Image (cartoon, rainbow, N blue to C red):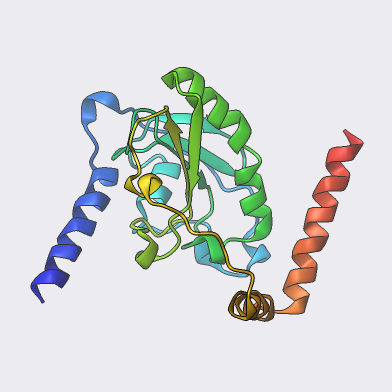
Amino acid sequence: MIKMESLARRRLLILSSHINPPAEILRPVSPLLASTSASEKGEKDNYSRSDCVFCNIIRGEAPALKVYEDDECLCILDTNPLCHGHSLIIPKRHFSSLDATPPAIIGAMCSKVPLISSAVMKATGCDAFNLLVNNGASAGQVVFHTHIHIIPRKAHDCLWASESLRRRPLTLDKEAAHLAKCIRENFTSSNNLEAIKGQASSLMGSYRER
């Protein structure tokens, strides 16, 4: 019980850091409108939620430092950063996690990563970055509105303890082959897979035409 209460307090503190960041470094974000119709998923609450801090930021009802904005997404400085320049790319429509987010929205977010990450690295004097998504509570997700972390890096900054761990090569045996087979079999459905492939082909076709 004590452990659960401690975990709950920790999550509340992290969430509060998004809601109530230091006032002297913040300015309000102007109200924004989601450009995609609710009929895409047929869920009205995918526009926004009153209990979501990121939705409040998008509506201009909570403060944040905005660094980029377009019709589909917004990028802000994380108010509880792991390092100087830690930024978040957020879709303007509410989706609770990456697996609940339509591929088209994920594509719109990811397509901005080269532009935003380059600007962040130049502004912070870094030469690299991590792209991170915490998907689900067990993976460390605290704000349940899809978002992508851009974390600028410098050599020997020792940000991740895991980087000092020794990685073991994959053994190409029956167990590994069985794992790969299970993953392939666990795609949600062949229809969804074909739809995703179709969207990828469409995007590549549009790119080649430019």
Quarter the N terminus occupies = bottom left
Up/down of 188 relative to 115, above or below? below
Q: Camera-side residue: 203 or 16?
A: 203
Quarter the C terminus occupies = top right
Furthest residue to the right? 209
State the image coordinates of residue 61 (x, y, percent, origin top left).
Answer: 35, 42
In this picture, residue 171 sits left or right of residue 55: right
- Which residue does the image show at 36% across and 32% down from the upper left? 28
Up/down of 57 relative to 155, above or below? below
Q: Quadrant of residue 27?
A: top left
State the image coordinates of residue 205 (x, y, percent, origin top left).
Answer: 88, 46
State the image coordinates of residue 36 (x, y, percent, origin top left).
Answer: 65, 52
In this picture, residue 104 sits left or right of residue 109: right
Q: Is residue 59 visible?
A: no
- Which residue does the image show at 49% across and 64% down from the upper left? 45
In this picture, residue 111 sits left or right of residue 204: left
Up/down of 86 relative to 99, above or below? above
Q: Camera-side residue: 92 or 30?
A: 92
- Which residue does the image show at 71% across and 79% down from the upper left? 189
Q: Is residue 194 visible?
A: yes
- Which residue does the image show at 29% across and 44% down from the upper left? 18
In this picture, residue 9 sits left or right of residue 38: left
How many numbered marks have been drawn onto this rendered protein structure? 0
Q: Camera-side residue: 62 or 106?
A: 106
State the image coordinates of residue 94 (x, y, percent, origin top left).
Answer: 49, 57
Q: Quadrant of residue 169?
A: bottom right
